Amino acid sequence: MREFTAVSLFCGAGGLDIGFEQAGFKTIWANDFDKDACETHQNWSSAKVVCGDIAKVDVTEIPDSDIILGGFPCQGFSLSGPRKIDDSRNVLYKHYVRIVKAKQPKIFVGENVKGLLTMANGNIFEAIKDEFSQCGYNVFSQLVNARDFGVPQDRERVIIVGIRKDFDINDFPIPVPKNKRMTMREALAGMPEPSPDDICNAPYSSRYMSRNRKRGWDDVSYTIPAMAKQVTLHPSSPDMEKLGKDLWKFGDNGITRRFSWQEAAAIQTFPRGLKFEGDLVSKYKQVGNAVPVKLAEHVATFLYEILTTKESEK
């Protein structure tokens, strides 16, 4: 099996990278600003991990690769919080553009939140795609839900794929597999009862109590967030009860608790037993910011086929 090389920007703990490695790619260089995330990445990867501000990384320090991966920071685009066009986090994609333009990989992949599609009536997203296109790429995008790709979670994300124009590929739909739904029962099967130290026990805010936060064992989870205190409830918790508009209460017939960080990682389809570095808040943040591994693997599988096909045509 041919192994293609990958460089990963904004790599985090490596959900995107792990998925691509499972499909036949090899991460050789990675970068993130978060020290804990970089150390977590190093726990499973042999890549050179450079921890620091991507704006200060010279492109000559980055090795050539077949593909560049990058789930550029998306908090400024998110539907779950304030959406500011001038949010400093929104311009980090420009460093991704800078590096893609300089390194000219065969393919690049980006991932972001659904909110990116509607900022400034869609003009922001179109401008981003245009900048990548000017680097010499046919750029494709698709809104997907991770639950359709073997991830036990409702998680809508935009996948952006750029394929160098000399490959002459003018369409890249991400096919949705059939019968790939996974429930929380399947995802969490065999997991031991977590230590209290591995579960966020912060007070539940009025924002948290404004809607239902619990789904059952035979359903998929709500989206795993990056903020520990907003993590949703374990399916063993009693059902929540609606009291009024934007007001819910916890049920009385059992113990209510959030997912542990390990359970949240399983919902994100990280390999079991992967060691995450940092304190509890940091672990939840790394898990919640990640691209679900199984979603990444599915996208990677089709990109791997494109690269192997093009190589065979040489």
Image: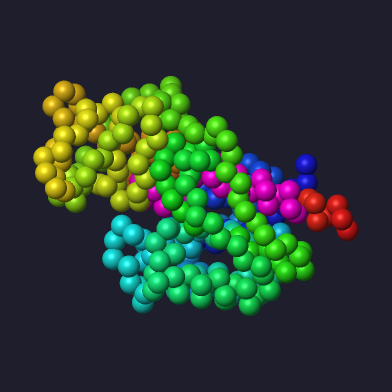
Left or right for 132, reference 87: right
For residue 23, above or below residue 71: above
Magenta region, residue range: 284-307
For residue 258, above or below residue 30: above
Residue at the image point whose x is 37% and y is 37% from the top: 221
Residue at the image point whose x is 55% and y is 71% from the top: 129
Tell me, yes or no, whether the highlighted magenta stretch contains residue 145.
no
Q: Quadrant of residue 21?
A: top right
Left or right for 75, reference 21: left
> Measured from the top left, where is residue 31 in percent x and y?
53, 61
> Measured from the top left, where is residue 245 in percent x and y?
14, 48
Of 133 and 224, nearer the camera is: 133
Left or right for 108, reference 14: right
Q: Considering the image in quadrants, where does the N terminus appear?
A: top right
Residue 214 in view (yes/no): yes
> Measured from the top left, where is residue 119 in percent x and y?
39, 69
Residue 103 in view (yes/no): no
Of 178 and 19, nearer the camera is: 178
